[in-house]
Image (cartoon, rainbow, N blue to C red):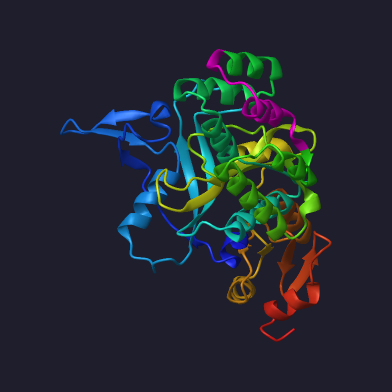
Amino acid sequence: MSDLYTRWGYQPVDLPALEVYDATHPKAEQAFTLTDPTGGLLSLRSDFTPAVARYVAAHEFAAGAPVRLQVSGSVWQAIHPDVGRTREFHQVGVELVGVSHERADAELVYLARETVRLAGLTPRVELGSPGLLTALMHEAGVPHDRREALAFAIDRKDVSDVERQLAAAGIVGPTADALLAMPDLYGPVERIDEAERWAAGDASRAQLRHLRGVIDAFDDPSELLLDLGMARRHTYYTGITFRAYTPDFGQPLLGGGRYDGALLPYAAGFSLSLERLERALGAPVSEPALDGLAVDDQVADRLRQAGFRVARSIATDLDGVRREAERLGAKWFAVGSEIHAIALDINVNAIEAAAQGRDA
C-alpha cells in the first residue's frame, strides 16, 4: 500500500505515538491517558489526523499547493472490544492537505478503491455528503440541539424516526420533505439528479455541485454508489465522505472524507485498519518478508544487490531448502546459482542472471 501511495506522491511521515492529552481531540473520549512525572496528562495516539495537523503546522509548505502525506502505525482506543474491533490496531492512511477541490476528493476516492483492489478484494465505494445534510438542516432551520438526533435517524435510514424528529423540531413543508428524502437516496450515482430537486438553498446546491464534480472527475463513475443518507460524523466532515466495502463482508474496510476547518483550513483523507482487512481476506495482508532463499552466501549477496529479498537457508540439501522456502512463503530458492521456482509468476532466467552476476 505504501508503494501505491508513494507513486501518487504521498510522502511517508513518522508521528509520535505518545501525545499531550487534548480534550478537544475528535476522539478524546476514546483515548488511553497516563500521567508523566511532572503531573502532565498524556495520551496514546487514538487517531492519526490531529497528529498530521500538528505536523503540517510545524513545517513550511508552499502556500496554496497540495500536501500529500501517508501514515502507518498503531493506534489505541479505549473502547469495549468485540468481534469487529480491538483496542489496539494498525492503521494506514493518507491525507491531502492545503486544497479543497473536486479533483482532490476524486483522487482520494480513487486511492480508496485501488487500496481494496491491491489487497485482492473487489471494491464497492459509497459516496455521501454530510456537508449536504448540514446545509439542508441549516436551510430548514433545524435547531442545533435537534440536529444530532435527526442526523442519526437519517444515517440509520429510519424514516419513521426522521418524521418524528422533524415534527419535534417543528419543521414542515419543502425543507422537511428534502430531509425526509435523504435516507432513500441510495444507489447509482445518477440518483444525484433526484437530489438536486430537493436542494433549494445556495449552500445545499453548492454541496451537490461539488459532489457531482467529484463523480465527474472519477475515472469510472459506474463503480461508485451514492448514499446521501450517510450522515456519520456530520459535524466533523464538511463535504463528501466515502466508505469502501467488499461483497460478503459486512463492515467498511476503510473510510474518510473532507474535513475543512475541523483541524486544518483545507484537508481530506481516509484510513483503514489492517486487522479488519485481514478479517475480510481471511489471511494476513502483509507480503512475504522474502523473495527467496539461497544456500550460497555469494549468490545471496549478488541477488540482494539486484534488489531481491533473500535469506540464507538453514538447510543445504535440495529437498530441505524447498521445504524451508515453502514454510517461509518464499517464491523461489537457489542452490548454487540455479533457481528453483515455487511460485508460477516469476522470471527464473532474470533471477538466475542476477545470481550469476550477469545481465538478464
Farthest-out residue, bottom: 359
Total number of numbered discs in the rendering? 0
Instruction: Name the one closer to the observer, 175 or 268.
Output: 175
Residue 246 sits in which quadrant? top right
Residue 239 sits in which quadrant? top right
Q: Quadrant of the N terminus?
A: bottom right
Image position of 344 (left or right of 35): right
Residue 71's spot in the image, x, y percent? 49, 52
Q: Residue at x 40, y 45 (%)?
A: 263
Farthest-out residue, right: 344
Image position of 149 (left or right of 173): left
Residue 309 counted in the magenta span? no
Question: Quick check: 328 above or below 128?
Answer: below
Q: Residue at x 33, y 29 (%)?
A: 33
Tell me if residue 226 can be seen: yes
Q: Quadrant of the C terminus?
A: bottom right
Residue 171 counted in the magenta span? yes
Residue 16's spot in the image, x, y percent? 36, 47
Instruction: Name the one closer to the observer, 248 or 222.
Output: 222
Q: Residue at x 48, y 52 (%)?
A: 267
Question: Quick check: 273 above or below 217?
Answer: above
Residue 281's spot in the image, x, y percent? 73, 40
Farthest-out residue, left: 38
Residue 87's spot in the image, x, y percent? 49, 29
Residue 339 sits in which quadrant? bottom right
Which span of residues is magenta-colored? Answer: 168-186
Instruction: Name the one closer to the observer, 301 or 155.
Output: 155
Give the main secondary structure of the magenta stretch: helix
Tell me if residue 288 can be seen: no
Question: Quick check: 242 above or below 358?
Answer: above
Image position of 155 (left or right of 146): right
